Image: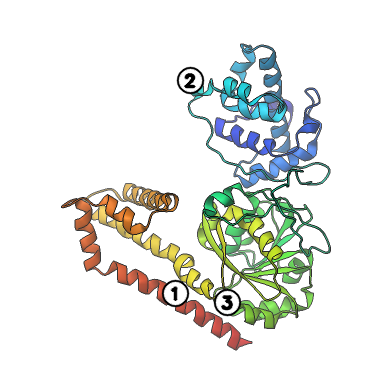
Protein backbone atom coordinates (compact mmCIF):
# COMPACT_ATOMS: atom_id res chain seq x y z
CA UNK A 1 0.00 0.00 0.00
CA UNK A 2 1.41 3.40 -0.97
CA UNK A 3 1.56 6.40 1.35
CA UNK A 4 -1.68 7.87 0.03
CA UNK A 5 -3.48 4.60 0.74
CA UNK A 6 -2.08 4.50 4.25
CA UNK A 7 -3.24 8.04 4.95
CA UNK A 8 -6.80 7.18 3.99
CA UNK A 9 -7.08 4.70 6.85
CA UNK A 10 -9.34 6.19 9.52
CA UNK A 11 -8.47 5.63 13.19
CA UNK A 12 -10.97 6.14 15.95
CA UNK A 13 -10.00 7.35 19.41
CA UNK A 14 -10.27 3.99 21.14
CA UNK A 15 -8.10 2.23 18.57
CA UNK A 16 -5.42 4.89 18.89
CA UNK A 17 -5.50 4.56 22.69
CA UNK A 18 -5.00 0.82 22.39
CA UNK A 19 -2.10 1.39 19.98
CA UNK A 20 -0.40 3.87 22.32
CA UNK A 21 -0.89 1.64 25.36
CA UNK A 22 0.83 -1.14 23.42
CA UNK A 23 3.73 1.10 22.36
CA UNK A 24 4.04 2.43 25.90
CA UNK A 25 4.87 -1.09 27.05
CA UNK A 26 7.44 -1.75 24.33
CA UNK A 27 10.95 -0.39 24.02
CA UNK A 28 10.50 2.85 22.09
CA UNK A 29 14.03 4.18 22.57
CA UNK A 30 14.97 3.33 19.00
CA UNK A 31 11.95 5.25 17.75
CA UNK A 32 12.98 8.54 19.38
CA UNK A 33 15.62 9.42 16.80
CA UNK A 34 14.21 12.51 15.11
CA UNK A 35 11.04 11.90 13.16
CA UNK A 36 12.18 8.70 11.43
CA UNK A 37 10.64 5.43 12.46
CA UNK A 38 13.64 3.11 12.44
CA UNK A 39 12.72 0.03 14.48
CA UNK A 40 10.62 -2.33 12.35
CA UNK A 41 10.70 -4.97 15.08
CA UNK A 42 8.83 -2.75 17.54
CA UNK A 43 6.01 -2.27 15.09
CA UNK A 44 5.89 -5.95 14.25
CA UNK A 45 5.39 -6.59 17.96
CA UNK A 46 2.73 -3.87 18.05
CA UNK A 47 1.04 -5.42 15.01
CA UNK A 48 0.77 -8.80 16.78
CA UNK A 49 -0.71 -7.21 19.91
CA UNK A 50 -3.14 -5.07 17.91
CA UNK A 51 -4.25 -8.14 15.99
CA UNK A 52 -4.80 -10.05 19.23
CA UNK A 53 -6.86 -7.09 20.50
CA UNK A 54 -9.09 -7.30 17.40
CA UNK A 55 -7.62 -4.42 15.34
CA UNK A 56 -6.40 -5.44 11.89
CA UNK A 57 -3.82 -2.88 10.77
CA UNK A 58 -0.73 -3.46 8.66
CA UNK A 59 2.72 -2.70 10.02
CA UNK A 60 2.98 0.22 7.58
CA UNK A 61 -0.29 1.67 8.84
CA UNK A 62 0.97 1.45 12.42
CA UNK A 63 4.21 3.18 11.43
CA UNK A 64 2.37 5.98 9.68
CA UNK A 65 0.03 6.51 12.63
CA UNK A 66 3.00 6.69 15.00
CA UNK A 67 4.79 9.09 12.67
CA UNK A 68 1.76 11.41 12.70
CA UNK A 69 1.36 11.24 16.49
CA UNK A 70 5.06 11.82 17.03
CA UNK A 71 5.12 14.79 14.66
CA UNK A 72 2.13 16.29 16.45
CA UNK A 73 3.82 15.74 19.80
CA UNK A 74 6.89 17.75 18.77
CA UNK A 75 4.80 20.53 17.25
CA UNK A 76 2.58 20.86 20.31
CA UNK A 77 5.61 20.78 22.58
CA UNK A 78 7.00 23.81 20.73
CA UNK A 79 3.64 25.54 20.41
CA UNK A 80 0.72 24.42 22.62
CA UNK A 81 -1.69 26.13 20.19
CA UNK A 82 -0.22 24.53 17.08
CA UNK A 83 -2.64 23.94 14.17
CA UNK A 84 -1.35 20.35 14.21
CA UNK A 85 -3.85 19.70 17.00
CA UNK A 86 -6.66 19.90 14.47
CA UNK A 87 -5.17 17.10 12.37
CA UNK A 88 -5.35 14.46 15.10
CA UNK A 89 -8.82 13.79 16.40
CA UNK A 90 -8.79 13.38 20.18
CA UNK A 91 -5.18 14.51 20.69
CA UNK A 92 -5.76 15.45 24.31
CA UNK A 93 -6.83 11.85 24.94
CA UNK A 94 -3.41 10.72 23.70
CA UNK A 95 -1.20 13.42 25.18
CA UNK A 96 -0.45 11.71 28.47
CA UNK A 97 0.57 8.47 26.78
CA UNK A 98 2.74 10.37 24.29
CA UNK A 99 4.50 12.17 27.12
CA UNK A 100 5.17 8.85 28.86
CA UNK A 101 6.57 7.36 25.66
CA UNK A 102 8.56 10.33 24.38
CA UNK A 103 9.46 12.39 27.42
CA UNK A 104 9.55 10.08 30.43
CA UNK A 105 11.74 12.44 32.42
CA UNK A 106 9.03 15.11 32.43
CA UNK A 107 7.60 15.68 35.89
CA UNK A 108 4.38 13.92 36.79
CA UNK A 109 2.88 17.25 37.84
CA UNK A 110 3.47 18.75 34.42
CA UNK A 111 2.04 15.69 32.73
CA UNK A 112 -1.14 15.95 34.81
CA UNK A 113 -1.49 19.68 34.10
CA UNK A 114 -1.15 19.14 30.36
CA UNK A 115 -3.56 16.24 30.44
CA UNK A 116 -6.21 18.10 32.42
CA UNK A 117 -7.54 19.54 29.15
CA UNK A 118 -8.86 16.08 28.41
CA UNK A 119 -11.99 16.45 30.50
CA UNK A 120 -13.25 19.60 28.82
CA UNK A 121 -12.55 18.65 25.20
CA UNK A 122 -12.89 14.92 24.74
CA UNK A 123 -14.78 13.47 27.66
CA UNK A 124 -13.34 10.94 30.05
CA UNK A 125 -9.89 9.47 29.62
CA UNK A 126 -9.38 5.96 28.38
CA UNK A 127 -10.31 3.32 30.90
CA UNK A 128 -8.00 0.73 29.35
CA UNK A 129 -5.80 -1.03 31.91
CA UNK A 130 -2.73 -2.72 30.51
CA UNK A 131 -0.30 -4.44 32.84
CA UNK A 132 3.39 -3.74 32.28
CA UNK A 133 4.79 -6.66 30.32
CA UNK A 134 8.41 -7.24 29.40
CA UNK A 135 10.10 -4.68 27.23
CA UNK A 136 11.53 -5.48 23.83
CA UNK A 137 15.13 -4.78 22.88
CA UNK A 138 17.31 -7.08 20.75
CA UNK A 139 15.38 -9.90 22.39
CA UNK A 140 12.48 -9.54 24.77
CA UNK A 141 14.59 -8.59 27.75
CA UNK A 142 13.10 -8.10 31.22
CA UNK A 143 12.92 -4.75 32.92
CA UNK A 144 15.54 -4.29 35.58
CA UNK A 145 13.13 -3.49 38.40
CA UNK A 146 12.85 -6.83 40.18
CA UNK A 147 13.35 -5.81 43.79
CA UNK A 148 10.08 -7.40 44.90
CA UNK A 149 10.18 -10.34 42.54
CA UNK A 150 11.56 -13.81 42.47
CA UNK A 151 13.33 -15.57 39.64
CA UNK A 152 11.34 -18.07 37.70
CA UNK A 153 13.10 -21.08 36.21
CA UNK A 154 11.54 -23.38 33.66
CA UNK A 155 12.68 -26.52 31.89
CA UNK A 156 12.67 -24.93 28.46
CA UNK A 157 15.54 -26.87 26.94
CA UNK A 158 17.84 -25.50 29.64
CA UNK A 159 16.69 -21.92 29.05
CA UNK A 160 16.04 -19.51 31.84
CA UNK A 161 12.65 -17.87 32.22
CA UNK A 162 12.31 -14.97 34.60
CA UNK A 163 9.28 -13.24 35.99
CA UNK A 164 7.81 -11.58 39.05
CA UNK A 165 5.76 -13.93 41.12
CA UNK A 166 2.45 -12.96 42.57
CA UNK A 167 2.59 -12.45 46.31
CA UNK A 168 0.09 -14.13 48.60
CA UNK A 169 -3.14 -12.38 47.76
CA UNK A 170 -6.00 -11.28 49.93
CA UNK A 171 -7.68 -10.10 46.78
CA UNK A 172 -6.57 -12.32 43.93
CA UNK A 173 -8.40 -10.28 41.31
CA UNK A 174 -6.43 -7.12 42.10
CA UNK A 175 -3.15 -9.00 42.50
CA UNK A 176 -3.53 -10.70 39.13
CA UNK A 177 -4.33 -7.44 37.36
CA UNK A 178 -0.99 -6.11 38.63
CA UNK A 179 0.98 -9.23 37.80
CA UNK A 180 3.82 -8.51 35.41
CA UNK A 181 5.01 -11.29 33.16
CA UNK A 182 8.61 -11.49 32.08
CA UNK A 183 9.63 -14.52 30.11
CA UNK A 184 12.14 -15.26 27.42
CA UNK A 185 10.68 -15.00 23.92
CA UNK A 186 11.78 -18.54 23.02
CA UNK A 187 9.21 -20.07 25.38
CA UNK A 188 6.90 -22.13 23.18
CA UNK A 189 3.34 -23.09 24.09
CA UNK A 190 1.48 -25.90 22.35
CA UNK A 191 -2.13 -27.07 22.40
CA UNK A 192 -3.27 -30.56 21.52
CA UNK A 193 -6.95 -30.06 20.81
CA UNK A 194 -8.62 -27.03 19.26
CA UNK A 195 -11.90 -26.76 21.13
CA UNK A 196 -13.38 -23.87 23.06
CA UNK A 197 -11.18 -24.36 26.12
CA UNK A 198 -7.98 -24.32 24.06
CA UNK A 199 -9.17 -21.26 22.16
CA UNK A 200 -10.11 -19.40 25.34
CA UNK A 201 -6.75 -20.09 26.98
CA UNK A 202 -4.85 -19.13 23.82
CA UNK A 203 -6.73 -15.83 23.55
CA UNK A 204 -6.00 -15.09 27.19
CA UNK A 205 -2.28 -15.77 26.74
CA UNK A 206 -2.14 -13.56 23.64
CA UNK A 207 -3.83 -10.68 25.46
CA UNK A 208 -0.60 -10.37 27.45
CA UNK A 209 2.90 -9.91 26.05
CA UNK A 210 2.99 -13.20 24.16
CA UNK A 211 3.24 -13.33 20.38
CA UNK A 212 1.20 -15.71 18.20
CA UNK A 213 4.36 -17.10 16.64
CA UNK A 214 5.21 -18.81 19.94
CA UNK A 215 2.00 -20.86 19.98
CA UNK A 216 1.13 -23.94 17.93
CA UNK A 217 -2.11 -25.94 17.89
CA UNK A 218 -2.88 -29.44 16.61
CA UNK A 219 -6.20 -31.11 15.86
CA UNK A 220 -7.17 -34.11 13.72
CA UNK A 221 -9.46 -32.03 11.49
CA UNK A 222 -9.40 -28.46 10.23
CA UNK A 223 -12.87 -27.65 11.54
CA UNK A 224 -11.73 -25.55 14.52
CA UNK A 225 -8.28 -24.51 13.33
CA UNK A 226 -9.37 -21.50 11.28
CA UNK A 227 -10.11 -19.39 14.37
CA UNK A 228 -6.59 -20.02 15.66
CA UNK A 229 -5.08 -19.06 12.30
CA UNK A 230 -7.03 -15.80 12.45
CA UNK A 231 -5.04 -14.99 15.61
CA UNK A 232 -1.76 -15.68 13.80
CA UNK A 233 -1.23 -19.04 15.52
CA UNK A 234 0.44 -21.90 13.63
CA UNK A 235 -1.69 -25.03 13.21
CA UNK A 236 -0.95 -28.64 12.35
CA UNK A 237 -2.55 -32.07 12.35
CA UNK A 238 0.44 -33.64 14.14
CA UNK A 239 0.33 -33.96 17.92
CA UNK A 240 3.94 -35.13 17.94
CA UNK A 241 5.01 -31.99 16.08
CA UNK A 242 3.41 -29.82 18.76
CA UNK A 243 5.11 -31.71 21.60
CA UNK A 244 8.56 -31.64 20.00
CA UNK A 245 8.20 -27.92 19.31
CA UNK A 246 6.76 -26.84 22.68
CA UNK A 247 7.95 -26.28 26.23
CA UNK A 248 4.50 -26.03 27.80
CA UNK A 249 1.92 -28.43 26.31
CA UNK A 250 -1.80 -28.09 27.02
CA UNK A 251 -3.71 -31.35 26.55
CA UNK A 252 -7.15 -30.01 25.68
CA UNK A 253 -9.01 -33.09 24.43
CA UNK A 254 -12.10 -34.95 25.62
CA UNK A 255 -11.50 -37.29 28.57
CA UNK A 256 -12.13 -40.45 26.51
CA UNK A 257 -9.32 -39.44 24.13
CA UNK A 258 -6.70 -38.92 26.82
CA UNK A 259 -5.27 -42.43 26.68
CA UNK A 260 -4.97 -42.40 22.88
CA UNK A 261 -3.30 -38.97 22.81
CA UNK A 262 -0.87 -39.57 25.67
CA UNK A 263 0.08 -42.97 24.30
CA UNK A 264 0.95 -41.25 21.02
CA UNK A 265 3.08 -38.45 22.49
CA UNK A 266 4.53 -40.13 25.59
CA UNK A 267 7.87 -41.05 24.06
CA UNK A 268 8.45 -37.43 23.04
CA UNK A 269 7.80 -35.89 26.47
CA UNK A 270 11.05 -34.93 28.21
CA UNK A 271 12.06 -33.22 31.43
CA UNK A 272 11.94 -29.83 29.69
CA UNK A 273 8.19 -30.10 29.20
CA UNK A 274 5.39 -28.95 31.44
CA UNK A 275 2.29 -30.94 30.52
CA UNK A 276 -1.00 -29.26 31.46
CA UNK A 277 -4.15 -31.35 31.19
CA UNK A 278 -7.57 -29.71 30.97
CA UNK A 279 -9.44 -33.01 30.48
CA UNK A 280 -12.34 -33.18 32.94
CA UNK A 281 -12.11 -35.96 35.50
CA UNK A 282 -8.71 -37.34 34.47
CA UNK A 283 -6.63 -37.53 37.64
CA UNK A 284 -3.00 -36.64 38.11
CA UNK A 285 -2.28 -40.26 39.05
CA UNK A 286 -3.73 -41.45 35.74
CA UNK A 287 -1.75 -38.86 33.82
CA UNK A 288 1.48 -39.78 35.58
CA UNK A 289 0.96 -43.46 34.74
CA UNK A 290 0.52 -42.61 31.06
CA UNK A 291 3.57 -40.35 30.78
CA UNK A 292 7.28 -41.00 31.47
CA UNK A 293 8.58 -41.06 35.03
CA UNK A 294 9.40 -37.64 36.49
CA UNK A 295 7.18 -35.85 33.96
CA UNK A 296 6.05 -32.44 35.16
CA UNK A 297 2.25 -32.53 35.06
CA UNK A 298 -0.35 -30.00 36.11
CA UNK A 299 -4.09 -30.56 36.04
CA UNK A 300 -6.08 -27.47 35.11
CA UNK A 301 -9.77 -26.75 34.90
CA UNK A 302 -10.65 -23.50 33.09
CA UNK A 303 -14.07 -22.34 31.93
CA UNK A 304 -15.48 -20.77 28.79
CA UNK A 305 -15.28 -17.09 29.86
CA UNK A 306 -11.51 -17.36 29.39
CA UNK A 307 -12.39 -16.30 25.84
CA UNK A 308 -13.18 -12.82 27.18
CA UNK A 309 -10.47 -12.89 29.87
CA UNK A 310 -13.04 -13.37 32.63
CA UNK A 311 -12.45 -17.05 33.33
CA UNK A 312 -12.16 -18.89 36.61
CA UNK A 313 -9.27 -21.37 36.54
CA UNK A 314 -8.15 -23.84 39.21
CA UNK A 315 -5.07 -26.04 38.94
CA UNK A 316 -3.33 -28.74 40.96
CA UNK A 317 0.27 -29.88 40.67
CA UNK A 318 1.46 -33.42 40.08
CA UNK A 319 4.10 -35.07 42.25
CA UNK A 320 7.00 -33.76 40.15
CA UNK A 321 5.72 -30.24 39.51
CA UNK A 322 7.48 -27.62 41.60
CA UNK A 323 6.39 -24.20 42.76
CA UNK A 324 8.35 -22.60 39.93
CA UNK A 325 6.28 -24.62 37.42
CA UNK A 326 3.08 -23.39 39.07
CA UNK A 327 4.39 -19.82 38.93
CA UNK A 328 5.14 -20.14 35.22
CA UNK A 329 1.64 -21.45 34.53
CA UNK A 330 0.10 -18.66 36.60
CA UNK A 331 2.14 -16.11 34.67
CA UNK A 332 0.94 -17.53 31.35
CA UNK A 333 -2.70 -17.65 32.40
CA UNK A 334 -3.19 -14.57 34.55
CA UNK A 335 -4.79 -12.64 31.65
CA UNK A 336 -7.42 -15.38 31.30
CA UNK A 337 -9.11 -14.33 34.54
CA UNK A 338 -8.99 -15.61 38.12
CA UNK A 339 -6.26 -18.25 38.55
CA UNK A 340 -6.10 -20.28 41.75
CA UNK A 341 -4.14 -23.32 42.93
CA UNK A 342 -5.64 -25.95 45.19
CA UNK A 343 -5.60 -29.66 46.05
CA UNK A 344 -6.67 -32.05 43.31
CA UNK A 345 -9.84 -32.99 45.20
CA UNK A 346 -11.15 -29.52 44.41
CA UNK A 347 -10.72 -29.82 40.63
CA UNK A 348 -13.83 -31.94 40.03
CA UNK A 349 -15.79 -29.63 42.36
CA UNK A 350 -14.56 -26.66 40.36
CA UNK A 351 -15.74 -28.43 37.21
CA UNK A 352 -19.26 -28.63 38.64
CA UNK A 353 -19.19 -25.14 40.12
CA UNK A 354 -17.54 -23.10 37.38
CA UNK A 355 -16.86 -25.25 34.34
CA UNK A 356 -20.46 -26.45 34.11
CA UNK A 357 -21.73 -23.55 36.22
CA UNK A 358 -21.39 -21.21 33.25
CA UNK A 359 -24.15 -23.15 31.50
CA UNK A 360 -26.31 -22.98 34.64
CA UNK A 361 -25.98 -19.19 34.61
CA UNK A 362 -26.90 -19.10 30.92
CA UNK A 363 -30.02 -21.14 31.64
CA UNK A 364 -31.02 -18.72 34.38
CA UNK A 365 -30.39 -15.74 32.07
CA UNK A 366 -32.51 -17.40 29.40
CA UNK A 367 -35.33 -17.94 31.91
CA UNK A 368 -35.10 -14.29 33.04
CA UNK A 369 -35.48 -13.10 29.47
CA UNK A 370 -38.33 -15.50 28.74
CA UNK A 371 -40.15 -14.22 31.81
CA UNK A 372 -39.89 -10.71 30.45
CA UNK A 373 -41.10 -11.85 27.02
CA UNK A 374 -44.10 -13.51 28.68
CA UNK A 375 -44.95 -10.17 30.26
CA UNK A 376 -44.78 -8.34 26.91
CA UNK A 377 -41.16 -7.20 26.36
CA UNK A 378 -39.55 -7.79 22.93
CA UNK A 379 -37.24 -10.82 22.93
CA UNK A 380 -34.10 -9.02 21.74
CA UNK A 381 -34.37 -6.34 24.40
CA UNK A 382 -35.19 -8.90 27.10
CA UNK A 383 -32.08 -10.93 26.27
CA UNK A 384 -29.88 -7.82 26.27
CA UNK A 385 -31.17 -6.69 29.66
CA UNK A 386 -30.91 -10.21 31.10
CA UNK A 387 -27.25 -10.51 30.05
CA UNK A 388 -26.44 -7.10 31.50
CA UNK A 389 -28.24 -8.02 34.72
CA UNK A 390 -26.13 -11.18 35.09
CA UNK A 391 -22.95 -9.25 34.25
CA UNK A 392 -23.68 -6.43 36.68
CA UNK A 393 -24.72 -8.74 39.50
CA UNK A 394 -21.58 -10.83 39.02
CA UNK A 395 -19.24 -7.86 39.07
CA UNK A 396 -20.90 -6.40 42.13
CA UNK A 397 -20.67 -9.75 43.91
CA UNK A 398 -16.99 -10.11 43.01
CA UNK A 399 -15.90 -6.55 43.67
CA UNK A 400 -17.91 -5.84 46.82
CA UNK A 401 -16.60 -8.86 48.72
CA UNK A 402 -20.03 -9.30 50.27
CA UNK A 403 -21.77 -12.64 50.75
CA UNK A 404 -24.47 -13.30 48.12
CA UNK A 405 -27.11 -13.46 50.84
CA UNK A 406 -26.18 -9.97 52.02
CA UNK A 407 -26.46 -8.50 48.55
CA UNK A 408 -29.76 -10.29 48.02
CA UNK A 409 -31.16 -8.82 51.24
CA UNK A 410 -30.05 -5.34 50.16
CA UNK A 411 -32.23 -5.63 47.05
CA UNK A 412 -35.30 -6.74 48.99
CA UNK A 413 -37.67 -4.24 50.59
CA UNK A 414 -40.56 -5.27 52.84
CA UNK A 415 -43.58 -6.06 50.70
CA UNK A 416 -41.68 -5.17 47.52
CA UNK A 417 -41.40 -6.84 44.13
CA UNK A 418 -38.15 -8.71 44.78
CA UNK A 419 -39.28 -10.65 47.84
CA UNK A 420 -42.38 -11.82 45.99
CA UNK A 421 -40.21 -12.98 43.10
CA UNK A 422 -37.79 -14.76 45.43
CA UNK A 423 -40.71 -16.52 47.07
CA UNK A 424 -41.70 -17.92 43.68
CA UNK A 425 -38.14 -19.09 43.04
CA UNK A 426 -38.02 -20.85 46.40
CA UNK A 427 -41.37 -22.49 45.69
CA UNK A 428 -39.90 -23.76 42.43
CA UNK A 429 -36.95 -25.23 44.28
CA UNK A 430 -34.31 -23.17 42.48
CA UNK A 431 -31.85 -23.32 45.39
CA UNK A 432 -32.03 -27.11 45.81
CA UNK A 433 -32.01 -27.65 42.05
CA UNK A 434 -28.86 -25.53 41.64
CA UNK A 435 -27.04 -27.35 44.44
CA UNK A 436 -28.04 -30.66 42.89
CA UNK A 437 -26.78 -29.50 39.50
CA UNK A 438 -23.32 -28.74 40.94
CA UNK A 439 -23.33 -32.08 42.73
CA UNK A 440 -24.35 -33.99 39.60
CA UNK A 441 -21.75 -32.26 37.42
CA UNK A 442 -19.04 -32.92 40.02
CA UNK A 443 -19.93 -36.61 40.26
CA UNK A 444 -19.99 -36.89 36.48
CA UNK A 445 -16.48 -35.40 36.31
CA UNK A 446 -15.31 -38.09 38.72
CA UNK A 447 -17.02 -40.78 36.64
CA UNK A 448 -15.27 -39.56 33.50
CA UNK A 449 -11.97 -39.82 35.32
CA UNK A 450 -12.69 -43.39 36.37
CA UNK A 451 -13.65 -44.32 32.81
CA UNK A 452 -10.49 -42.80 31.37
CA UNK A 453 -8.41 -44.73 33.91
CA UNK A 454 -10.25 -47.96 33.13
CA UNK A 455 -9.56 -47.51 29.40
CA UNK A 456 -5.87 -47.68 30.15
> Between disc 2 and disc 1, whose residue precedes?
2
Mark 3 surroundings: few (<14), some (14-19) or many (≥20) residues within 10 A: many
Residue located 71% across and 63% down the image: 324
Quarter-of-image position of residue 225: bottom right
| Residue 149 position in % (x across, y down) | 70, 51
Residue 387 appears left or right of 430? right
In the drawing, what numbered circle is on residue 255?
3
Separation of disc 1 and disc 3 at Cα?
14 Å
Separation of disc 2 and disc 1 at Cα?
53 Å
Q: Quadrant of the C terminus?
A: bottom right
Q: Judging from the image, what secondary structure is the residue with disc 2 in? A: helix
Quarter-of-image position of residue 298: bottom right
Give the number of callouts.
3
373 versus 298 height, above or below: above
Residue located 61% across and 17% down the image: 85
Q: Which residue is mark 1?
A: 441
Mark 2 surroundings: few (<14), some (14-19) or many (≥20) residues within 10 A: few
> Between disc 3 and disc 2, whose residue precedes?
2
| Residue 115 position in % (x across, y down) | 57, 23
Q: Which residue is mark 2?
A: 120
Question: Which residue lies most toward the left here?
Answer: 415
Q: In front of the other: label 3 or label 2?
A: 2
Quarter-of-image position of residue 71: top right
Q: Judging from the image, what secondary structure is the residue with disc 1 in? A: helix
Amino acid sequence: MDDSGIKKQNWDITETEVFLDILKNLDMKKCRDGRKVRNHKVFTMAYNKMFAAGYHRTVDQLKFRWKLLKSTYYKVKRDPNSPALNKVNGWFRYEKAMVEIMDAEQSVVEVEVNHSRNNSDDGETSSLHWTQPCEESTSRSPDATTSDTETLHSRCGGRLVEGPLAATQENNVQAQSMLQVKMEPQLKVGFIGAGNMAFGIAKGILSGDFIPGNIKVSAPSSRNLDKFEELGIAVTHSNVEVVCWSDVVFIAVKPHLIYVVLNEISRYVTDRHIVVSVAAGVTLAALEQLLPDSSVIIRLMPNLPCVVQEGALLFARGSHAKQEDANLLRSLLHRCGLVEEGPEDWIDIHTGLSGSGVAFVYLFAEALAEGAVKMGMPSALANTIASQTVLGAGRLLRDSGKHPAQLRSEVCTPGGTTIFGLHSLEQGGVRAATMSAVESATNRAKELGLKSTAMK
